[in-house]
Amino acid sequence: GAGVSQSPSNKVTEKGKDVELRCDPISGHTALYWYRQRLGQGLEFLIYFQGNSAPDKSGLPSDRFSAERTGESVSTLTIQRTQQEDSAVYLCASSLGGSTNYGYTFGSGTRLTVV
Amino acid sequence: QQQVKQSPQSLIVQKGGISIINCAYENTAFDYFPWYQQFPGKGPALLIAIRPDVSEKKEGRFTISFNKSAKQFSLHIMDSQPGDSATYFCAASFTDKLIFGTGTRLQVFP
């Protein structure tokens, strides 16, 4: 597609439930990133996929968070046993390669609310 | 060392005025400094970027000033317009991962 697509755009879930967030990057973009944006705060790095390399998971806040990517296409971010502090906008971005050469293109995000 | 500190948190400017947002970093290995603009309900979009081998980069009304010795960089928006009202994020990287500042909410009043 023309841009990065994220679904759902909004998700309300009960505390303790698992959620899956989906990201469809721009075709041909080898790099894919997940960031978390809490209300009124900056973008917090979660995880980075680059081609077939092992993902950089250094930003995942706990073992309740995991992400997968199939080849150079779709990625899913899974949050298990959701907590209220997980409420945030989850942003996905893709890039042709490393950010020092190419800018990120962000999706519009998934707004997650844990009640 | 991985942080990028951004100020102010919010900024109100009159139409036609100059908006200035500042960022500071510690890690001297950073070699790429972009600014992103985010409108409500949208993801951030790349606005302008600079590398540390230049002190200034201008694109239309937007200018990045870079001070390598002070480890600071700033975004200047000349002739600010109501349509510039958005949240602005500075960022820095030295690998493939961007570290973002905490954001500045800019409001431009007519």
Image (cartoon, rainbow, N blue to C red):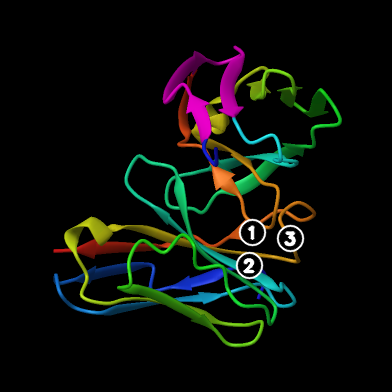
Q: How much space separates mark 3 and mark 1, taking CA atoms?
A: 12 Å
- Between the residue at mark 3 and the residue at mark 2, the CA separation in whole angstroms equals 18 Å
Mark 3 sits on what residue? A98
Q: Tell me the subunit letter for badge 1.
A: A
- Residue A32 vertical placement versus A51 (above, below): above
Q: Residues within 10 Å of mark 3 (few under 14, many from 20)?
A: many
Mark 3 belongs to chain: A
Q: Please state the horizontal and vertical placement of residue B16, each as a whole percent of the image.
A: 61, 13
Q: Mark 2 or mark 1, which is nearer the start of the sequence? A: 2
For label 2, the crowd category at 10 Å Cα-Cα, with few meaning under 14, some 14 to 19 and many 20 or more, is some
Mark closer to the chain start, 3 or 1: 3
Q: Residue placed at 52% from the left, 38% from the top? A: B3
Q: Position of residue A103 (x, y in %)?
A: 71, 53
Query: Callout 1 environment at 10 Å: few (<14), some (14 to 19), or many (20+)?
Result: many
Is A8 left or right of A14, judged from the image as shown? right
Mark 3 or mark 2, which is nearer to you? 3
* Residue B60 is a magenta residue: no
Q: Position of residue B40 (x, y in %)?
A: 43, 46
Q: Are marks 1 and 2 in contact (CB under 8 Å)?
A: yes
Which residue is under mark 1?
A: A105
- The secondary structure that dominates the magenta segment is strand
- The stretch in magenta equals B4-25
- Residue at disc 1, secondary structure: strand
Height in image: B46 above or below A2?
above
The tag on residue A42 is none
Which residue bears the numbered disc 2?
A: A3
Mark nearest the camera among 1 and 2 is: 1
